[in-house]
Image (tube, rainbow, N blue to C red):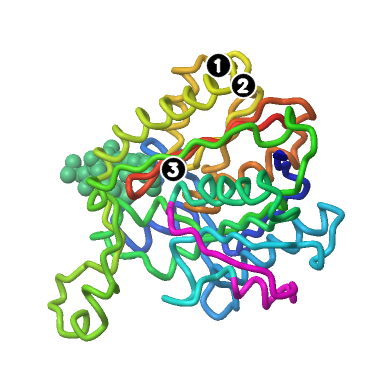
Amino acid sequence: MYNSKIIGLGKYLPENVVTNDDLSKMMDTNDEWIQERTGIEERRWIKEGTDDTSAVMGAKAARMAIERSGLTKDDIDFIVFATMTPDYYFPGCGVQVQDMLDIKNVGAIDIRNQCSGFVYAISVADQFIKTGMYKNILVVGAEYHSNGLDKSTRGRGVTVIFGDGAGACVLSREEDTTKGILSTHLHSEGKYADKLIVEAPSIKHWVPQIMEAEEEDLSYFPFMDGTFVFKHAVIRFSEVIIEGLTKNGLQKEDIDMLIPHQANLRIAQFIQKKFALRDDQVFNNIMKYGNTTAASVIIALTEAWEQDKIKEGDNVVLAAFGSGFTWGSVIIKW
Ligand code: COA
């Protein structure tokens, strides 16, 4: 058995910055409400007319991650792509990245686990490396939310939260099993699927039904019971971080860097307080990008690394919670 180790990190954010004031021109909202409830100051939304999509942004982030890893595209053995906003209903974005980066005909899969998508993706990749099946895996998380949001006042509870962007890493075989990814922990609770959901288009509710539906059919916009989700998020985040620490004989004081999924700054602050972590032990960038779902953890990890906030030997914890419900954590010895 081997361990896997992150050897290259990359990100891509669309240039177009949308501030809270910009949103208040589209809907009845304001900077104060958004900052107070979520911590978000601005987000990136793909500008109409550009070529960016989830697959395109994912490929850009992936190119950076491969370059920084010191490998070439020809060294990549497998692709795992996490997104809830794929370019096509099918096929997935993973195969598009294989084509866009001209990677040889390796396997490619998509992970559909929303906010915990990247944690699930990295866990899947880790298993392939642990068993020796693959040596270098490209793991991508990307979301193009802005084209699917209700930008009227009706959608304000959800729309102000989400942003577009992508992150990627190259996960590689590590012979020393005391280093790299030490463990991953995944969970789900499907009974709450309807608390955070985009219902359509789905095979149950396909294009003809949508076209015939009344104007009040909002099934193709994200629905979120925000308060319910918030309450579950803070519990599950804590549980799954503790689960990961316990598995590795670590205490909360041993965390050098916690990268929580960027769902809401208030959730991250709650966790920080609960675990008595200092500001320099938790990384947040939701202020700049909003919630980029499957891209959020990997964009944050990339920026923490770019800012020299992670050193060799550090205990790094990734944790996420989201629609499904699904949640998970990853414990890394950097
Ligand atoms: N601007 C201004 N007012 C808004 C608004 C906006 N963008 N969105 C909602 N409101 C209003 C509501 O209409 C409501 O008004 P009312 O009291 O007159 O009915 C009021 O603000 C409170 O709404 P509520 O939804 O109860 O707010 P909240 O305090 O729960 O905050 C969230 C909303 C979404 C920020 C919060 O619930 C949250 O972050 N939830 C978790 C999100 C999450 O973790 N997702 C996980 C993965 S994506």
Label 2 CB less than 8 angstroms from ligand 1: no
Residue range of the region highlighted in magenta in the rendering: 95-114
19 and 2: which one is in front?
Answer: 2
193 and 173: which one is in front?
Answer: 173
User: Residue 263: which numbered mark, if any?
Assistant: 3
Q: Is residue 35 above or below residue 70?
A: above
Count neighbours of disc 3 (C-alpha within 10 A) and say few if under 14, some if 14 to 19, many if 20 or more: many
Residue at (75, 64) in percent of width and height: 63
201 and 217: which one is in front?
Answer: 201
The kind of secondary structure element at disc 1 is helix
User: Residue 255: which numbered mark, if any?
Assistant: 2
Q: Nearer the viewer, mark 3 or mark 2?
A: 2
- Measured in 3D between alpha carbons, the distance from the residue under mark 2 to the one under mark 1, in whole angstroms, is 6 Å
Count neighbours of disc 1 (C-alpha within 10 A) and say few if under 14, some if 14 to 19, many if 20 or more: some
Give percent across and percent down for residue 182: 64, 32
Q: Quadrant of the N terminus?
A: top right
The reply to whether the C-beta atoms of the residues labelled 3 and 2 are less than 8 Å apart is no
- Measured in 3D between alpha carbons, the distance from the residue under mark 1 to the one under mark 3, in whole angstroms, is 22 Å
Residue 14 in magenta stretch: no
Give percent across and percent down for residue 297: 56, 44
Label 3 CB less than 8 angstroms from ligand 1: yes
**Quarter of the figure with residue 56:** bottom right
Instruction: Identify the residue position indicated by label 1 in the image.
Output: 252
Examine the rendering and report whether any part of residue 33 can be seen.
no
Residue at (62, 66) in percent of width and height: 57
The kind of secondary structure element at disc 3 is loop
